[in-house]
Structures are given as C-alpha cells and as structure tokens.
Amino acid sequence: MKKIEVLGSGCRKCKRLEKNVQIAVKEMGIEAKVEKVQDISEIASRGVMMTPALVVDGEVKSRGKIPSPKQIKELLK
C-alpha cells in the first residue's frame, strides 16, 4: 500500500491537490493511504518551502503546484 501525503496549510490549492490525488488513486485502482499534513514545522522539516506538496512513500514528488490527476498517476507509478 502506498502512503501519499498532501502537505499544506489547508488552503484552496491544498484541497484541490488532495482531490486530484483521490481521483488518481481511484482511477488507478490502487490501495493507498492518503494523509494531510498541515503542521508547518513538519512541512519545513521535510525541506518543503512551497505548498502544496505531494509526498509518495516519503519522497517529495511535487511542490508549489497542483498536478492534474493524470500527472499524479505518472508520479505514483
């Protein structure tokens, strides 16, 4: 099972990224645990200075933008 984290303060962009992640996971039919991380200290400790950010299995895959569901599927492969 993949662990997917959306890092951000809970802003509109962060919520959009979370929605796109849910769409991508559903379309791929994979098992994934999707979590939101809103603690600024936790986000900064991962070296992320621009949100929203997408983390897959501990690796930052995207930061400062909102990938489409199609782009997220590529990142999850």
Image: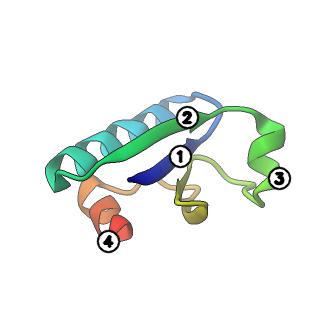
The quarter of the picture where the C terminus appears is bottom left
| C-alpha separation, residue under disc 1 versus residue under disc 3 | 14 Å
The percent position of residue 38, horizontal first and vertical second, equals 67, 32
| Residue drawn at point x = 24 percent, y = 43 percent | 23
Q: Amino acid at mark 1?
A: Glu
Mark 3 secondary-structure assignment:
helix
| C-alpha separation, residue under disc 1 versus residue under disc 4 | 16 Å
Q: Amino acid at mark 3?
A: Ser
| C-alpha separation, residue under disc 2 versus residue under disc 1 | 6 Å
Sequence-first tag of 3 and 2: 2
Left or right: 3 as drawn, with respect to 60: left
Residue holding disc 3: 45
Residue holding disc 4: 77
| Residue drawn at point x = 29 percent, y = 48 percent | 31
Query: Which residue is at the far front?
Result: 1
Sequence-first tag of 1 and 3: 1
Q: Amino acid at mark 4?
A: Lys
Q: Are marks 3 and 2 in contact (CB under 8 Å)?
A: no
Q: Are marks 2 and 1 in contact (CB under 8 Å)?
A: yes
Sequence-first tag of 1 and 4: 1
The percent position of residue 10, horizontal first and vertical second, equals 58, 28
Residue holding disc 1: 5
Mark 1 secondary-structure assignment:
strand
Left or right: 25 as drawn, with respect to 64: left
Residue holding disc 2: 36
Depth check: give the residue in front, 23 or 63. Answer: 23
| C-alpha separation, residue under disc 3 versus residue under disc 4 | 26 Å
